[in-house]
Amino acid sequence: MDKKIIYSGIQPTGLVTLGNYIGALSNWLKLQDNDEYQCIFSIADLHSLTVRQVPSEFRNRALSFFAQYLACGLDPQKNIMYFQSHVHEHAELTWILNCITYIGEASRMTQFKEKSQKHPDNINMGLMDYPVLMAADILLYNTSLVPVGVDQKQHLEIARDLAARFNNAYSPTFTVPEPYISKVGAKIMSLQNPLAKMSKSDSNLNATISILDSQDDIMRKFKRAVTDSDNEIRIGEDKPGITNLITIYACSKGISVEDAVKELQGLSYAALKEAVGVSVVDLLAPIKSRYDELIKDKDGLLAIAKAGQEQASSIARKTLRKVYKKVGLVQL
Ligand code: TRP
């Protein structure tokens, strides 16, 4: 396999949002048809256990995330798509990497500190180990590129450090991954606070659009979107709310921001919100109907997950065997 590996995981928590779709998924749809790359996508379910989950809800949500990825058009024939927990090598490589990770570096991670503050009654080992498991995800597959937002940059740094540390201590084994910065993929902001990114775990449901929201919900949320008090439709740092709406419109229609501004020029804010809402409804309608079909057929979904697990395992198994040998474990 000479193709460059791109690896990304998503935790099955919160919602798959319009921001995920425009910012990441739509870009991956292009990559799956690009011969230079092989993409691997996992549902990072083991990561989500660092926060307490209700088992029955968690199971359904994980399967729903998988179906939503498929409904967005990610093709399991072109990408490797699987659940992290179905490939036991992730947990095993985590252990080996744990033994070369310093408590100091793990406890300095911003996300560890933030989550410890947020859940002071559940500061568990897994929370601190989170970036090591993520490093294992990435390093098992000879990954060259990892698409990361700012919040995961530090974790990718740890993955790079661990890869280099292992390679130095033993011999060259892991590819040291680089961040993948996409050229297109616009950043979509919260509808209620356009200075913050639209977050899949925002507790204010008016701030985010789920890709499965009904037409009515979508229109209502755009109607309530925070804007400003002049009446000018243009992009600009001084107009984060309107800029966000114009960006969403442009991405939903697949046109440039400049063309979007031209089309929307002269509308009232109410009419602007209506137009943006309709563009998003049109974008998401086919995704939602594909999702409805997929989620009805649980056996079909599990068969796709099983095929993904087999592909992922065959790579992960080889990497882990090499690693076990290099650290001096007895081979049978
Ligand atoms: N930690 C990532 C997040 O919350 C999800 C993730 C898990 C991931 N494993 C990964 C991302 C490997 C990239 C590569 O966003």
Image (cartoon, rainbow, N blue to C red):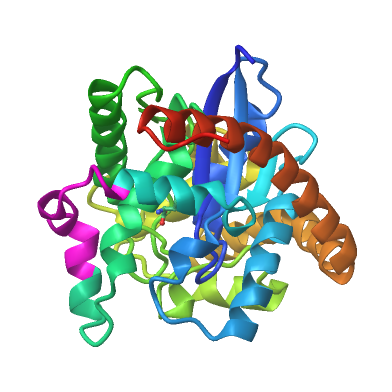
- Decide: is 98 above or below 212: above
Q: Residue at x 50, y 71 (%)?
A: 14
Provide residue 5's location: percent of width, then percent of height. 54, 26
Q: Residue at x 64, y 62 (%)?
A: 65
Provide residue 176's location: percent of width, then percent of height. 35, 24
- Decide: is 127 above or below 122: above
To which quarter of the image does residue 329 belong?
top left
- Side (left or right) of 129 relative to 253: left
Q: Is residue 108 magenta?
A: yes
- Decide: is 307 above or below 46: above
Q: Quadrant of the C terminus?
A: top right
Q: Is residue 74 magenta?
A: no
To which quarter of the image does residue 191 belong?
bottom left
Q: Residue at x 83, y 67 (%)?
A: 292
Front-most of residues 7 and 208: 7
- Side (left or right) of 298 relative to 113: right
**Is residue 66 visible to the viewer in this orientation of the structure?**
yes
Provide residue 84's location: percent of width, then percent of height. 57, 54
Decide whether the magenta segment is chiefly helix, strand or loop: helix
Q: Residue at x 44, y 62 (%)?
A: 47
Query: How many numbered discs, if any?
Result: 0
Q: Residue furthest top?
A: 2
Provide residue 221's location: percent of width, then percent of height. 53, 74
Q: Which residues are magenta?
A: 98-114
